[in-house]
Image (tube, rainbow, N blue to C red):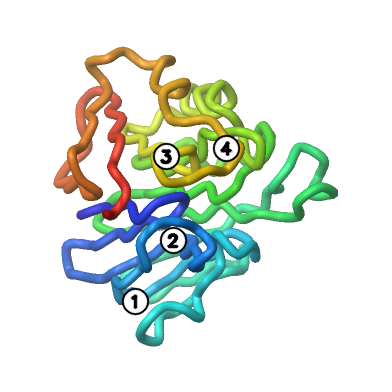
């Protein structure tokens, strides 16, 4: 499996049989590169411009937006309803966490989660292998809350997202605060936008990708 970070909350996940999953596509208002990958499946955690730009994508992908999820012979998507804020959606609305099962891995994309998870929500995430989690704060959970969730569900692989970068001027923090909670030995700074995961590491690993340039 390969995971490529376009920027913000947008990843391209390519399975071993070359099925392509794109998460939370952003539109041209964000300063990241135009998304050019064609996907078979697209997940949209919520309807904000920096997460729902399906109409700008090429091809005719299966779009998964509802917490009812989707399943076919290749892949399974499950949704968990959460909120974009810590006020039950009264500030920024609802959000879906999507659990993607493929290549014998369980991947969770948290979208713009904005609050601590309840026990019932956490219980559905306890067997997650790969976690894509926002860490920038303000619009989402911050680095400290993200680390608390990591400690609860104990994924083997973590990829932080939705943080301030060299091109993004949103009022959110960079990734360094989140990294400060981990041992340096567990952090792998990738010189590029993509990482290949053939098997899960024995010890927890955190990959920091560069956005597509």
Disc number for residue 123: 4
Which one is earlier in the sequence, the residue at label 1 or at label 3? Answer: 1
Disc number for residue 23: 2
Secondary structure under the numbered disc 3 in the rendered image: loop
In the picture shown, does residue 177 fall above or below 99? above
**Can residue 119 be seen?**
no
Q: Quadrant of the C terminus?
A: bottom left
Give x and y (percent) for residue 104.
Answer: 27, 53
Decide which of 76, 111 is in the foreground and name it: 111
Which one is earlier in the sequence, the residue at label 1 or at label 4? Answer: 1
Residue under numbered circle 3 = 165
Evaluate if marks 2 and 4 touch, with contact meaning CB atoms under 8 Å apart: no
Evaluate if marks 1 and 4 touch, with contact meaning CB atoms under 8 Å apart: no
**Can residue 127 be seen?**
yes
Mark 3 and mark 4: Cα distance apart in space: 32 Å
Q: Nearer the viewer, mark 3 or mark 2?
A: 3
Task: Mark 2: give few (<14), some (14-19) or many (20+) Cα within 10 Å.
Answer: many
Mark 3 and mark 2: Cα distance apart in space: 19 Å
Asked whether, in this view, residue 154 is left or right of residue 84, the answer is left
Q: Which of marks 2 and 4 is in front?
A: 2
């Amino acid at each position: 499996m390969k995971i490529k970070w376009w920027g913000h909350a947008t990843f391209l996940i390519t399975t071993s049989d070359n099925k392509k999953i794109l998460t939370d596509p952003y539109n041209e208002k964000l300063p990241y590169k135009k998304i050019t990958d064609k996907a078979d499946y697209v997940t949209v955690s919520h309807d904000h411009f920096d997460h729902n730009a399906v109409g700008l994508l090429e091809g005719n992908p299966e779009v998964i937006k509802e917490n009812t999820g989707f399943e076919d012979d290749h892949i399974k998507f499950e949704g968990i309803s959460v909120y974009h804020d810590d006020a039950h959606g009264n500030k920024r609305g609802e959000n879906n966490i999507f659990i993607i099962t493929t290549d014998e891995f369980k991947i969770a994309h948290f979208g713009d989660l904005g609050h601590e998870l309840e026990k019932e929500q956490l219980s559905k995430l306890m067997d997650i292998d790969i976690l894509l989690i926002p860490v920038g704060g303000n619009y989402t959970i911050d680095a400290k809350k993200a680390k608390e969730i990591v400690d609860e569900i104990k994924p083997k692989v973590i990829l932080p997202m939705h943080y301030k970068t060299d091109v993004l001027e949103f009022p959110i923090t960079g990734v360094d605060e989140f990294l400060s909670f981990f041992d340096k030995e567990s952090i792998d700074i990738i010189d590029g936008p993509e990482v290949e995961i053939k098997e899960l590491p024995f010890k927890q690993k955190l990959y920091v990708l560069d956005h597509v340039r």
